[in-house]
Image: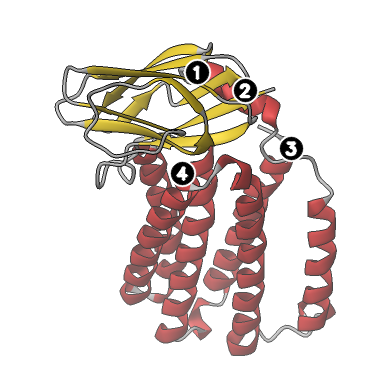
Amino acid sequence: MPISLYVTVIGIFILTIWIIWNTINHRNKITVMTGMMISMVLGMVVGLTIGVIIGVLLSGDLFSSTLWAIIIGISVGFVAGLPTGLMAVLDGILAGLMGGMMGAMLGDMIAPENQETLIKIMFLLFIGIVIILYQMMQQEFIKSKSMINHPTAMIILFVLFIVSYNQMDALIPSTDLHNNSNHHHGVSTNNFVVQADEYTFSPSQIEIKAGEMATIVLENIGEREHDLEIIGMKAEIEEQPSSNDHTHTNNQIHLHSYPGEKQEVSFTTNTPGTYRYVCTIPGHEESGMTGMIEIIP
């Protein structure tokens, strides 16, 4: 994992602990309503931010990313609400649950070329919300006279951090992406079989060479019908299967397969880039039937 991603995760951890420590330290001064607000905001924003990161790192495995994001979001909401009572705990748990679910889904579904930008936006949004939350706590019960706690000082530090953060190395280098694809059932060939099950594709990451003919075989090993569509990739189709329940354009890769059935298509594409392939049957993409295909020069 790149150093910049470590910095992001550690930053989330430190700021979360900072808010929780202040909540515990001043628990006797916190009203129930303020405690509910703190636990709700912290549970939601941590669940959402961590969920996006996990969703990106575990792209193609929506169940696992959602489960981990929910666990983290609920845990943060629970701990943040504990010092001020059960109402705050309940608010924190529900907010962490919702944040984790939404974050994981967003991270899993975002296009690969936008993953790094999304993580950066979510991290900076997280910091901004934590600063606002702390300023609320400062006015309500902390009431510290330290210059560092002044809103202007915090805004200046935030701006300086944004500049420094953007100078760091890539969060998800393409070389790491290639290594991960090989490690997570990836292939590097222009002829490959994609197995469809409930609700996954295997492999979930594929690399093929531009300008050469490639063949995709969709093998349905599940008990439901599935299809495979490559989003946004234009190709010259050399051989199109005759059995297909979905309409398609001549340059759109789309395969449909019933349980136990195989369908295949051969094509050529000259446009390098990274594209997603999904199952377009209602509900299947949302359940985790997504993958990534990279066309290399």
Foreground disc of the pair 2, 3:
2
In the picture of the structure, the residue carrying the numbered disc 4 is 108
Quadrant where the C terminus is found in the figure: top right
Instruction: Name the residue type under label 3.
Output: Ile
- Please tell me in which quadrant of the rendered image residue 133 appears: bottom right
Residues at discs 4 and 2 in contact (Cβ within 8 Å): no
**Residue 55 location (% of width, % of height):** 48, 43
Q: Secondary structure at mark 1?
A: loop
Foreground disc of the pair 3, 4:
4
- Give the distance between the C-alpha atoms of the residues marked 1 and 4, in whole angstroms: 17 Å
Q: Secondary structure at mark 2?
A: helix
Q: Residue shown at 42%/41% (left/top)? A: 65
**On residue 186, which mark appears?**
1
Quadrant where the N terminus is found in the figure: top right
Q: With respect to residue 297, does 107 lie above or below?
A: below
**On residue 178, which mark appears?**
2
Instruction: Name the residue type under label 1.
Output: Gly
Mark positioned earlier in the residue sequence (2 or 1) = 2
Mark positioned earlier in the residue sequence (1 or 4) = 4
- Give the distance between the C-alpha atoms of the residues marked 3 and 4, in whole angstroms: 22 Å
- Give the distance between the C-alpha atoms of the residues marked 4 and 2, in whole angstroms: 17 Å
Image check: 213 left or right of 100?
Answer: right
**On residue 3, which mark appears?**
3
Mark positioned earlier in the residue sequence (1 or 3) = 3
**Residue 175 location (% of width, % of height):** 69, 25
Residues at discs 2 and 1 in contact (Cβ within 8 Å): yes
Mark positioned earlier in the residue sequence (2 or 3) = 3
Q: Secondary structure at mark 3?
A: helix
Q: Residue shown at 42%/63% (left/top)? A: 77
Instruction: Name the residue type under label 2.
Output: His
